[in-house]
């Protein structure tokens, strides 16, 4: 896929995998949009990328993924400036050791890791449809194998476990991908997700320092972790492939739960209930 002049939006690009993805796609000629909560940090990322790719086209736009209002405002601003979106990469993610709430009063991990990309994608879908062939890429994790969707306590109100909340959100990313891919069949929009590997990023900074240091010794670099995302965004080899889960640039088999169409449909309906007032 020739990325010259293509509009590419990447969430969570102020560090780690997202930053390296932005760097690589900018070097291929893509026009990069970076939604960011911390604008200062985003400006530093932009400056860093421009050092290696002086002609890179990068625009920073304010967006807080823990707020539906901020996401909605961001999309309105984006649509006022751009009539196309060729690549959407939902990369942002977090782990919380203690239960926290988003601006909308929703458990933070579920809100940022699942509902934010769900809402952002839905709000941008009309723009993406005008830009075909287009690609939507969701960053998931092998952590999804360890859990299911707890519809009886999806926000961990009764019992909260930070790792389980994270794993559930990564499972939700795959279920969202597969359901959306079915909905968009024949439109020229592909929707895929991936496991980036166990990457040494800020995601694990919530772990106490001694353990964090030891864990990161066995992790791959953000640049290595970004390779599959970059591949799905740019490679002609995946043209026409949709609804798949990738690992190390190859199609992999997600868990049985992740392949359950009924669970995917139920999660989609529940997600719509969370954001229905915005449509």
Image (cartoon, rainbow, N blue to C red):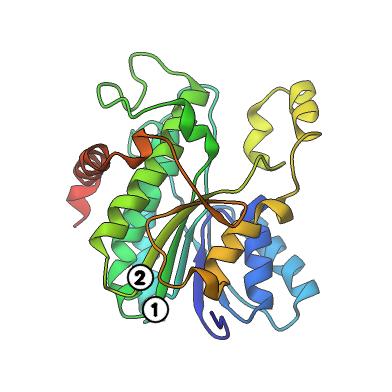
Q: Residues within 10 Å of mark 2 (few under 14, many from 20)?
A: many
Residue 112 in the image: state x and y as whole percent: 43, 43
Residue 180 lies in quadrant: bottom left
* Residue 219 against residue 88 in the figure, above or below: above
Task: Give whichever of 6, 11 is nearer the camera.
Answer: 6
Which residue occupies 47% across, 19% down?
A: 161
Q: Which mark is residue 151?
A: none
Which residue occupies 39% across, 14% down?
A: 159
Which residue occupies 36% across, 78% down?
A: 80
The answer to whether marks 2 and 1 mark residues whose Cβ atoms lie closer than 8 Å is yes
The C terminus, quarter of image:
bottom left
Between discs 2 and 1, the one toward the N terminus: 1
Residue 232 in the image: state x and y as whole percent: 53, 64
* Residue picked out by circle 1: 133
Residue 196 in the image: state x and y as whole percent: 60, 48
* Residue picked out by circle 2: 189
Task: Give whichever of 88, 76 is nearer the camera.
Answer: 88
């Amino acid at each position: 896929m020739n990325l010259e002049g293509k509009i590419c939006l990447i969430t969570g690009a102020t560090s780690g995998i997202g930053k390296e993805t932005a760097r690589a796609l900018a070097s291929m000629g893509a026009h990069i949009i970076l939604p960011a909560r911390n604008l200062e940090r985003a400006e530093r990322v932009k400056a860093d990328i421009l050092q290696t790719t002086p002609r890179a086209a990068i625009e920073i736009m304010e967006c807080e993924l823990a707020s539906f209002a901020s996401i909605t405002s961001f999309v309105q601003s984006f649509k006022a400036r751009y009539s196309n979106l060729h690549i959407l990469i939902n990369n942002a993610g977090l782990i919380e050791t203690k239960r926290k709430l988003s601006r909308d009063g929703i458990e933070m991990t579920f809100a940022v890791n699942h509902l934010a990309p769900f809402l952002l994608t839905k709000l941008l879908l009309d723009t993406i449809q005008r830009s075909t062939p287009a690609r939507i890429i969701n960053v998931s994790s092998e952590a999804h194998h360890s859990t299911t969707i707890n519809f009886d306590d999806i926000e961990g109100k009764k019992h909260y476990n930070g790792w389980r909340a994270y794993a559930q959100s990564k499972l939700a990313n795959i279920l969202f991908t597969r359901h959306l891919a079915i909905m968009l069949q024949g439109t020229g929009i592909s929707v895929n997700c991936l496991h980036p590997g166990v990457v040494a990023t800020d995601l694990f900074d919530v772990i106490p320092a001694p353990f964090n240091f030891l864990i990161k010794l066995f992790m791959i670099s953000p640049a290595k972790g970004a390779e599959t995302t970059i591949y799905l965004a740019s490679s002609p080899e995946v043209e026409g492939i949709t609804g798949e889960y990738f690992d190390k640039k190859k199609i992999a088999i997600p868990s049985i739960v992740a392949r359950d169409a009924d669970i995917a449909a139920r999660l989609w309906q529940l997600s719509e209930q969370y954001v229905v007032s915005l449509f």
